[in-house]
Amino acid sequence: MQLTTLLYKVPLQSTSGNMNVEVSKLTMDSRQAAPGGLFAAIRGTQTDGHRFIDKAAEQGVSVVLCEEMPENRSEQVTYVQVLDSSYALGLIAANFYDHPSKKLKLVGVTGTNGKTSTATLLFRLFQRRGYRSGLLSTVQNQIDETVIPATHTTPDTIALNELLVQMTQRGCTHCFMEVSSHAMVQQRVAGLHFAGGIFTNITHDHLDFHETFDNYIKAKKSFFDQLPASAFALTNLDDKRGLVMLQNTRARKESYSLQTLGSFKGRILSEGLFGMQMEVDGREVWFKLTGRFNAYNLLAVYGAAVLLGEDPEESLTQLSDLPSPPGRFEMVISDTKIVGIVDYAHTPDALQNVLETIAGLRQGNEQVITVVGCGGNRDAAKRPIMAEIACKFSDRVILTSDNPRNEDPMAILEQMQAGVPPLHFKKTQTLVDRREAIYRAVELAQPNDVILIAGKGHETYQEIKGVKYEFDDRKILREAFQQS
């Protein structure tokens, strides 16, 4: 494709070289730079792509996209200077791949908690309703029945457009994707055309990246600010920042609520470990999912389906039969009737939501035993808060490793221990080894007790010092049950 065509609607600062050159490939990685390609110099959190411009030029790229013009420029390379390389690359990628997002009904889901559940349930619902659909989530990417492992909550802009192209080639009509706050700041969804956006909630998370909660809110809100007038913007009316998200959007404003009169209104009638009865827009429905947090997810999915033109009654009927996504309140029950729950809850609010749900489902004197850790190289401020919440809502607490990454796991646990109130010292213990912690929880449990293993959910690895080791909470819990 000719460079001038690729740069349609891209705000330029300056250019140097032949603007009529042909471009056959896009890359942000200088190691993949090749003749005929365009190399985008992106400023990342770990490195600055501008450092590799000369390397890309040596490898024969036709075009370099950058924010700063290099002093020494190759005569064989065209240089395009822009204010924001990430944003410009989003527009360029959309042009290069012929705007695949416009050929689908693309719905983005953003918020602190519930993104994966909401996007996954939407995907499953529309698949059941006979549509070929795509899914882009933390757990996995999926094109109709084909599963593609996910490396990020939201892929980079080039990979994202490539996936959307594959979806259109496979006959998909819809795509449901998580939109992370990192993705918004890094402009990964720039150039995409959304048919709708959903806001779940916002609580304490990712302050290691955003630095302040206000920045985090602004990152989420920017997704709705960019929605077109043809799209819908569906917000959680019960979240105190739900309406803030829609203040400047051009999209059609819609809402869902359990507490007030939103566009889509729900009410929990009864709930148990294996499901709940709800009233949704005047219809009574039994869902396989349970818990107040899932009630919000189900309302968001139902509302989005209706806004996408689906029949309300049929949508509720099919939604009622869907199971929880992997690692989201996923139950493993022992032969002795100990209930194990594996959940991805890795924020204070998510952990409290799950534990409050379990507390509300207790029938008698069952113990709640919580195994929880916090990830390394991430928001450290939430560590003592997570431990305090675990102690408040549990009879026994085992603090353990999550994904320590490049941090000392014991140092992370010491920060968590700082949040344990003196009143709860006796019921709390610390085991660095996560496998040992899970086995210990099973040893402590009696029939009908509930063990919550929080933090990793669907993950099948544990990251330690840059190495990912095989580790699946669900698998280890089953092993512990069998050996108990």
Image (cartoon, rainbow, N blue to C red):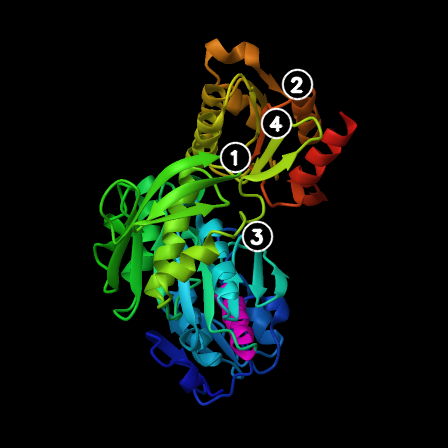
Pick whichever of labels 3 and 1 is earlier in the sequence: 3
- Badge 2 density bin: few <14, some 14–19, many ≥20, Cα 10 Å: few
Q: Residues within 10 Å of mark 3 (few under 14, many from 20)?
A: many
**Tag 2's secondary structure?**
helix
* Residue drawn at point x = 26 percent, y = 57 percent: 254
Closer to us: mark 2 or mark 1?
Answer: 1
Q: In the image, 436: left or right of 297?
A: right
Specify the amino acid type for callout 2: Leu
Residue drawn at point x = 38 percent, y = 59 percent: 313
What range is drawn magenta here?
156-169
Q: Is residue 8 above or below residue 247?
A: below
Callout 3 secondary element: loop
Contact check, label 2 and label 4, Cβ < 8 Å? no
* Rendered residue at 32%/74% (across/down): 11
Dot 1 corresponds to which residue? 273
Residue 357 within the segment the image draws in magenta: no
Distance Cα–Cα, label 2 vs label 3: 31 Å
How far apart are the two marked residues, 2 and 1, measured between alpha carbons? 21 Å
Of 183 and 286, which appears nearest the observer?
Answer: 286
What amino acid is labelled 1 in the image? Leu
